[in-house]
Amino acid sequence: MKTYLVTGGAGFIGSNFIHYMFKKHQDIHIINLDKLTYAGNLENLKKVENNPNYTFVKGDICDKKLVEGLFKKYDIDYVVNFAAESHVDRSIREPELFAKTNVVGTVTLLNVAKTAWEAESGFKEGKKYLQVSTDEVYGSLGKEGYFMETTPLDPHSPYSSSKASADFMVKAFYDTYKMPINITRCSNNYGPYQFPEKLIPLMINNCLGKKPLPVYGDGLNIRDWLYVEDHCKAIDMVLESGRLGQVYNVGGHNERNNLYIIKTIISYVHDNVDSTVDESLIKHVEDRKGHDRRYGIDPEKIKNELGWYPETSFEIGIVKTIKWYFDNKDWMKNLTSGAYEEYYKKYYKM
Ligand code: NAD
Ligand code: TYD
């Protein structure tokens, strides 16, 4: 039985990953280490909380003693590090917090795992540390081209810079100690359980509540959208078969601009839920500082080496996602900290 230490498992992608892994594998133990910040929500994990192969630990990845204790108590095979401060807008307001969690937290996990996994020559068999990174570390694209694993890192926001710094630390543990690692860099995820500060759940929630839909700048910035389950599948494959020390980009050529996404959501809601919801809710607001114009992933490496491909097109995934938020209105209402409403009022004044 393999034992996984999943950090940040109460967040959006981490909780989807835990559900995906228990559906896919019978004989695994998952320990979820999560600090439960505003973005961590144990409601995301209700379906697994009584599973005897699931253990929740509330704590901080920067807490070295706590992480050491977990490695002493359990024979951990895989570390999958999702834990992070993940929102660009917040990073512009609170860069220090991003450096702490995303960089210091990553180094703490790496160092404790290294000590626990070291053997007489090299590392114990079958161990791996996987860093969940982002395409944002590559910077911003013009109209042409894609991010490849060989694209030089050129992050702009405090968020992407902290993720790039963490990636360099992971690389250093491979280059220096030959620690078994992989890094995955995925594009923007969407799907169930995403906190409504990110574009898609925010727009769905605001459509539901008939609140204004804040569009930064001209709304023509492009992101490459990845359905979260496809991302979970990629992580599972990289853990099992990724070549040690390698970076894998994860994306499915689903580039869309922000206005297209917002109009798609409005149109679905208009046709299926409330015909009074329309484009008059769109409100152009001040642009994000240093706003990256376009992200686009070249996924050839993970396709060719591991046979990964995305199963969900954007058109199908967005409808599944909108329906999930409609079917789970209580999830939105019960968000643990209530921080969302406060944040929204403070910054958007709408
Ligand atoms: P999220 O904000 O929804 O969840 C982050 C989780 O980490 C929360 O449960 C939070 O409580 C926990 N956490 C925060 N600080 C912690 C700490 N110090 N110790 C322990 N737990 C802590 O984020 P997400 O969208 O699920 O993203 C997960 C990972 O994927 C992040 O590393 C992010 O950089 C990366 N990523 C996300 C996207 C995306 O589109 N969401 C895209 C690319 C990469
Ligand atoms: P976001 O979901 O914050 O992800 P990221 O910045 O990490 O790509 O934003 C996605 C895009 O949507 C980005 O171009 C910023 C834009 N955006 C808005 O126009 N309005 C909003 O309210 C939000 C949250 C984002």
Image (cartoon, helix red, strand yellow):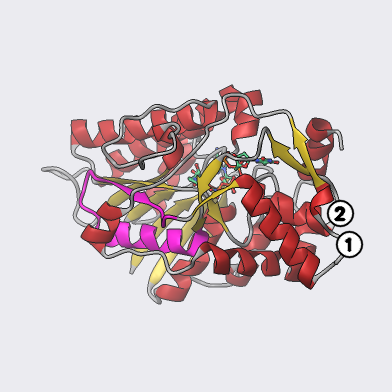
Residue 65 horizontal side relative to residue 342, left or right: left
**Residue at the location (20% across, 52% down)?**
243
Residue 55 horizontal side relative to residue 302, left or right: right
Report if residue 249 lies within the magenta region: yes
Residue 260 horizontal side relative to residue 187, left or right: right
Q: Tell me: residue 47, above or below residue 37.
A: below
Q: Is 215 in front, or is 320?
A: 215
- Residue count near mark 2 (Cα–Cα under 10 Å), binned few <14, some 14–19, many ≥20: some
Q: Is 193 in front, or is 315?
A: 315
Report if residue 302 lies within the magenta region: no
Residue 348 horizontal side relative to residue 141, left or right: right
Q: Tell me: residue 211, above or below residue 319.
A: above
Please name the amino acid that badge 2 sits on.
Lys
Image label count: 2
Q: Mark number for residue 39?
A: none
Task: Name which quarter of the figure residue 93 lies in.
Answer: top right
Please name the amino acid that badge 1 sits on.
Thr
Regarding ligand 1, which quadrant of the image does it lie in? Answer: top right
Which quadrant of the rendered structure holds the N terminus?
A: bottom left
Residue 56 shows up from this direction: no
Mark 2 or mark 1, which has the lower sequence index? 2
Residue that label 1 marks:
276
Residue 183, position as x, y percentages in the image: 33, 44
Residue 349 shows up from this direction: yes
Residue that label 2 marks:
210
Region of the chain picked out in magenta, as a range = 227-253
Residue 106, position as x, y percentages in the image: 42, 36
